[in-house]
Every structure is written in C-alpha cells, then in structure tokens.
Image (spheres, rainbow, N blue to C red):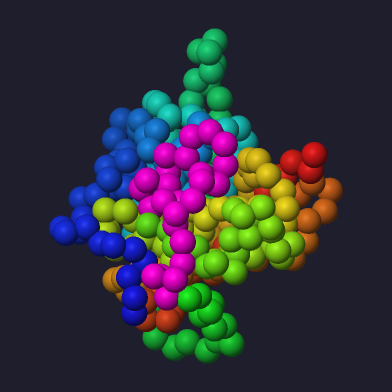
Amino acid sequence: MPEAASAPAVPATVGDSEFDRDMHVTRRAPGVYDIDLSAGWTIINAVNGGYLLAVLGRALGDALPHPDPFTVSAHYLTASHPGPAVVRTETVRAGRGLSTGQASLFQYDDEGNEVERIRVLASYGDLDALPDDVRTSAKPPAIPPAEHCFGPEDGPAPVDGSSAIADRLRLKLDPATLGWALGQPSGRGEMRAWFGLADGRDADPLSLLLAVDALPPTAFEMGLKGWVPTVELTVHVRCRPAPGPLRVSITTRNLAGGFLEEDAEVWDSADRLVAQSRQLARVRLA
C-alpha cells in the first residue's frame, strides 16, 4: 500500500504526538475537564469540527466505563476559537457492552459569559471485543496512488485566511476532485484523499473523528466558495484501523435551501471500512 506522503524519519506514536497533546484534557472534578484548544487545528480562525469532536471523545473516553467511541453525534452551536475551554460530561447509561454519555464544550465571550460551543451524545464500547464477521457491499474508493495525488503544498490554500490545520495533516487529494483548485469545479459533490497525520502517528478511533471532517468541503467542487460551517455531524466508528494511511471519500447528493449533506467513508490500509459519517452543513450561495 503506498504511503500518503513522505513519512517523518521517526514517526510519532499514538499517545505521544501533537494530536494527542492538543487533545489532552485535565480532569478538574468528576465529569469536568479543562483544555486549551490549539490554534494548530484552525481554518479561517475557527477550530476544526473534527478536532473538537476528538477532544470531546477523549473526555468521554475518560468519563465512561468503555474505551472506544462507537457512535458520536454532535451539534455545533457556535464557532469555537483557540484558547481555554471547559468540557462537561454526564454518564447517561452504563451497560455491559455499551455505555452512553453526553458532553458539552464551553468557552467565554468578551463579557465573561459562558457560551456552549458544541454538544455531543455518544455511545462507547470495546472495538476489540467485536466479532470478525463482516458482510458488506461497500467497496474502497478508487483513488490514484499517493504520488499521483496532490496536497496543500502543491497549490494555493483552499480557502482565504488561516489554514493551520493543513500543516498537521498529510493530505493527498484525488486529482478528479481538484477541479475547484484550478477554477474548473466539476459540479459533482465529491472529495477523495489519502489521509494521515503529518508527524506519522498511526490512526486510532479518535483520529477517525478528525478524518471525516478534515478534507476540503464538497461544496468547492460544486462551484461554491467560502466557509462551510457544520451544523450536525454523526460518526460511526466500525473497527480499529490498521497501521498505515487512510482513504477518505466524501459525497454530497443534495444541496437545497442553503444546506448540504456530506456522507463520508474512511478505509484503512487493510481495505476495511473503519468509519462512516453524515454531516449537515450550511453553505454561502452568494
């Protein structure tokens, strides 16, 4: 399997990488966690929604009796910004095979008022305890080898403003979904890429929460520009990913009333479908 991009000489490991450090939450009290949201995961000065989901996923993994996210549904209420934040979690139910919890992330506005940024409801279990039985009609996306794909370093930034997150990823986009970068969008709501973290850290369930929201929006290939803020995002983690680069495929079938959906699939180096998601996002039509 080809690499998504040049790997660092000494790859970072799960638990000891920039991604892990920037997700680190400090338990202040039972169910209450402090974090300093890193500016390294921003785009247009707002914190990326996938990174935020991983932060909340980390807090829930500490608060709940089961280790791994199975399904995470998030509503993005207001834009998050780099800096201090508080995560509050609550255990809704703790069963033998699954536990369910909710979490919210808060920041303070200029007047010192607490503002809720994102609210999550999630079910956790143990991915290593799942049976190996797989019956699927899904097929991995057809993406050219990474050396025939293109990353942010090969062209202009995908959006105006800050795109610090691009420096922390190893993205190689399928040329068939790059017409927007050349001023010739295809009109098809598709985006496909090889995905990895820039420091070589292998994927785990929390990084899958990032992967589904890390590609340029499908709206670009539909001829639209500008920020595409997430309204709601649900992720299903299906199994623990094998080491190596991931392939991410995102499709939009319907843009109506200023909103579109993005359906994402994430495949690992063993050709397994390791995560799926659906996102509702707002687009600027003018």
Query: Residue at 56% across / 53% down in the picture?
Result: 216
Q: Quadrant of the C terminus?
A: top right
The reply to whether residue 145 is visible in this rendering is yes
Residue 276, can we see it? no
Q: Residue furthest left?
A: 10
Up-down relation of residue 112 to residue 166 (above or below): above
Q: Seen in the image, is 111 located left or right of residue 22?
A: right
Residue at the spot 27% in from the left edge and 45% down from the top edge: 18
Give x and y (percent) for residue 7: 25, 62
Magenta stretch bounds: 145-169
Residue 220 magenta-highlighted: no
Q: Position of residue 269 (x, y in %)?
A: 36, 76
Q: Residue 74: image x %, image y %? A: 57, 48
In the image shown, does 87 or 164 lie closer to the viewer? 164
Residue at 70% across, 63% down = 186
Instruction: Spot the residue most to the top.
Output: 111
Q: Quadrant of the N terminus?
A: bottom left
Q: Quadrant of residue 194?
A: bottom left
